[in-house]
Image: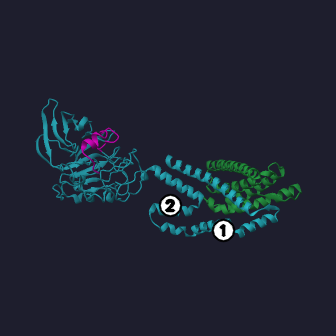
Amino acid sequence: MIPNRKHHSARVYPERDRRNAENRLIKVDGGSTASYDYDALGRMVEQNRSGAYTQLLYSPTGMVVETGLTPNGQYQQLRVPLPGGAMAIWSGPGGSIFFYRHADWLGSSRLGSTPSRTTYFDVAYAPFGETYASSGSADPAFTSQRQDTVSGLYDFPAREYSIQGRWPSPDPAGLAAVDPMNPQSWNRYAYALNDPTDLVDPSGLGSCGDFISCVIDSGGPSGNGGDIFFFGVGSFGHPCPHLYDGGCYIGSPNGGDDNGTGRSHGNSSGPTMGPTPAPRPPTIGPTTDWSDSKQAMCVAQAVKAVGKDLIFSDVFSAVSDSIATGSLSPLKDLLSAGTAVTAVEQTADYVAGQRVIQAATRGFLRSQGFRVSASAIGRDASLLGKWAGVVGLALSTKTGYDAYNACMSN
Amino acid sequence: MYEQLIRKKRKHLLTWENFGIVIGALVALALVTITDRRGMPHKWHTAIFGTIVPFGFVMSRFRMRWNRLSFWAALTICLAIHTAAIWIFFQYVLSNAQTIGLLLWLPLAFIEAFALLVVVKRLEEKLTGKYESLRLD
């Protein structure tokens, strides 16, 4: 474990950086160094560096495949992923230079080779991504993230990463990124839980194991679980807990939040748009997966619907809200309605149990020409209770079933 | 021997009662399905519950009179009046309510059930012109 590193900005004035409403960097040093444009999915699509425009083209899996598109269509670099984290690169205008990048266990390119089996470049990385001992035309890519934008800043999809060993901007998830059980996650500027030789942070939103297990084994850039290159489909994407100012990335998955802890929940289900639920507060101890599932939510809704149908809407809402929020305050609303229910129950018990009531009922029926015994009154009450119970149960079951189905199909 | 006959008769009655209750529940389910499909509020579940329970009880209690036309006529009149009253109550009096708890209606259903025993008997007497004592056991 490597201790926190202090931020010493060697480049510019980070306080002059400008961000858009989604907290994405749009101007570096107030625009004097670079400015950026993003597409609807939150991906950087154009860079303007002192008037030199570079456009980025993404593959369907979200990986940058072309950079530096010019008006006449020539690219500056074309990247084709290969097995094992390697990559074929056509570089230079029109792809005049061709070489292969070879990745280490973190996905960092340590070696470039040419088709004629000669070394194109060689570079080494310090734990936090600083390069050293480079030779040849070094093209550094730390954990497969390159420095397309500004030298010294790796372009992670969600955040720029400084070679100073920390994020210049905090984890946008806020407190949701914090795992109380892991003090390393308390620093929202820390990279990969300050364990950069074991963990990678492919999106800039949460760390996971090494490059091979995170990317290659989980399906690779084109796989469902291995898209590390941006927060599209993949287990690294951070959905709603990792928000920018309360809004969710367009294109972020609905599942797969790992809160920077390496724990992932749920599955991704494709792009979503619009507002999303508020982030959950951090929890201590293991999480119960089923209780977070849609099925659990629908069962709760079904129970709520049954209770609403069976008892009284306000009463059951107050009880269920109290349970859901863990607060007793909604129960205050229960007072009047709860008293009514209690009164009904007590009245029913009184009627069933008091011989006086039985005698009165019997007397009333006798006066109307019925010959009825006290035991017959009890049996009648029992029969009536059976009717009410069975019919009520049938209706409640249907209500619950309908609510569950409606919830699951929603 | 007599005890055995009584036990057999009660078992027979119990089977019929349970069968009737199941039929009543199915009828209630069918009605509720119809109201749901029409998008009517859930309060109508209670209205159906408040109809099926007392009338089902009266029908099962008066099983020995099922062969009398006057009984069915009296029951139909009561059902018509009850339905009209329930309709007015739920449609107009409780026009703003969306849900009314089944259990809240239960005491009313109990009272109505015993009242129906008397009303149906009285109506039957009016229809036939004959007064008779009825044994409930």
Instruction: Please report the bounds of the magenta region as a residue range.
Output: A206-229
Q: Quadrant of the C terminus of chain B?
A: bottom right
Residue closer to the observer: B19 or B76:
B19
Res B94 seen here: no
Going from the N terminus, do you reach mark 1 or mark 2 first? 2
State how far apart marks 1 and 2 are (Cα).
29 Å
Residue displayed at 17% across by 43% down: A140
Q: The green chain is which one?
A: B
Colour given to chain A in the rendered image: cyan
Q: Image height check: is A21 above or below A61?
A: below
Q: In this view, does A49 lie to the left or right of A389?
A: left
Residue density around tag 1, few if under 14, some if 14–19, many if 20 or more, within 10 Å = some
Name which residue type carries label 1.
Answer: Tyr
Percent across and percent down for residue B2 are 77, 52
Residue displayed at 24% across by 43% down: A211
Residue at the outermost top position: A116
> Which residue lies under the disc numbered 2?
A320
Residue A335: which quarter of the image?
bottom right
Prevailing secondary structure class for the magenta stretch in the rendered image: loop
Q: What element carries label 1?
A: helix
Q: What element carries label 2?
A: helix
Percent across and percent down for residue B51 are 70, 55
Residue closer to the observer: A101 or A181:
A181
Q: Does the magenta stretch include residue A209?
A: yes
